[in-house]
Image (cartoon, helix red, strand yellow):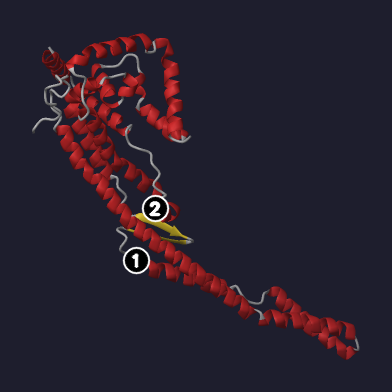
Amino acid sequence: MQQVCYERLQAWIGELSDRAGFVEEQRVQWRQALLSKIPEDQHGARYPHLERLCTNWAALNGQLNRASLNTVFLDHMREIFESSLPSSTRLAEAVDDLLTHLVTDHDAAELPLRKEEARLQAIIAQDGRVDIAEKHHDLEREAFEENVSFTQLLTNAAMHAERSGASRASQRLAFALSRAWVHNAFSDLTIETRRTQPDTAHLQIGNWTGQTHDGTEEKALRSSLEQHIHSECLAALALVKLGPKHVICGILGILLLLSMFTGNFIFAFIGVALLAWVFFEYRGLEKKRDMVRDSFDRRAQSEKADLDGCLAEYVEWLRDFAARDAVATQTSAYIDAIAPDSHLALREESSRRILSNS
């Protein structure tokens, strides 16, 4: 009986597939469902230099999350297909559970409240990041609709069982019927993630900017940073000089000093004081220059250490992304291996049929 139902459902899907644009609609539908599974993790704790000094860190952080979809979705499918289904001896319990759901589940009047509850739960799950929570809530909104298409019902069952109330067997059935669409949508997202990967990390350390493609340009970037700091140091040293006020006070001091020849010793004393002040200011210029040099030396050491940290972390980021991206092959193979009869409930003494041998 189960096999007959499955074949009937396949026939319906075959008839729907003949409709213009139907396959493309399913591709988009499943793409949205997969997007809802992309995590919103913050990886700054692992890459503190990049988070602080890389101007396109948001893109790098987002790419790690997109690549993480491979593992997240693979784990999602494994949980569905590699856990046991209710055996025939427990079908009575399953019927009881179904009746309980029919009695206790919300009705249409409660739907807006359920949607708001889910939105608030999403905000809590995202630690108060409202924009991210609402984005994920929007991607899952189809799971709350009272009236949905047959194929959307399959997507909701496969991806949002907690929202749609689908059983494990229903999830397997949904995946089995939608395998081709899932494969296409997952392939599209994998290609998009690889295509949109930033080819450089843009760095801003102090007033200096640079970029790295693979983290191996250390010599050139250090030279550029040192030259930049040296130029700023020279500019700062050029500012350490006597200013207009010193020139004015010096000239005034000389004129007042000359007044002693007219017998005005008070003005002459003031002139001596002004000249002494200018002299001591001049003597202090070299000390100020030494302070400027020391300040830029400390800055150079600190910023070169920041640069080294950024380059090392970017190399690690590339390895991290490559490792997460490589799981896509395994995930795609798992999708292709889903058996058409994987949804069938088996007898306890029978071996489990989870995946096909293909």
Regarding mark 1 in the picture, which secondary structure is present there? helix
- Sequence order check: which comes first, mark 2 or mark 1? 2
Q: Is residue 113 visible?
A: yes
Q: Nearer the viewer, residue 39 or 303?
A: 39
**Image point (83%, 81%), residue name:** 270
Q: Is residue 211 visible?
A: no
Q: Amino acid at mark 2?
A: Tyr
Q: Residues within 10 Å of mark 1 (few under 14, many from 20)?
A: some
- Could you say where residue 350 lies in the image, as x and y percent from the top left? 11, 23
Q: Is residue 98 above or below residue 333?
A: above
**Image point (48%, 61%), residue name:** 207
- Could you say where residue 134 lies in the image, as x and y percent from the top left? 42, 30
Question: In which quarter of the view is residue 273 placed?
Answer: bottom right
Question: In which quarter of the view is residue 240 placed?
Answer: bottom right
**Image point (28%, 37%), residue name:** 72
Instruction: Name the side, left or right, on which 154 lies relative to 290.
Output: left
Q: Is residue 117 above or below residue 147?
A: below
Report the residue marked by disc 1: 218
- Viewport quadrant of the C terminus: top left
Instruction: Name the side, left or right, on which 240 lies relative to 34.
Output: right
CB under 8 Å between discs 2 and 1: no
Q: Residue 47's mark?
A: 2
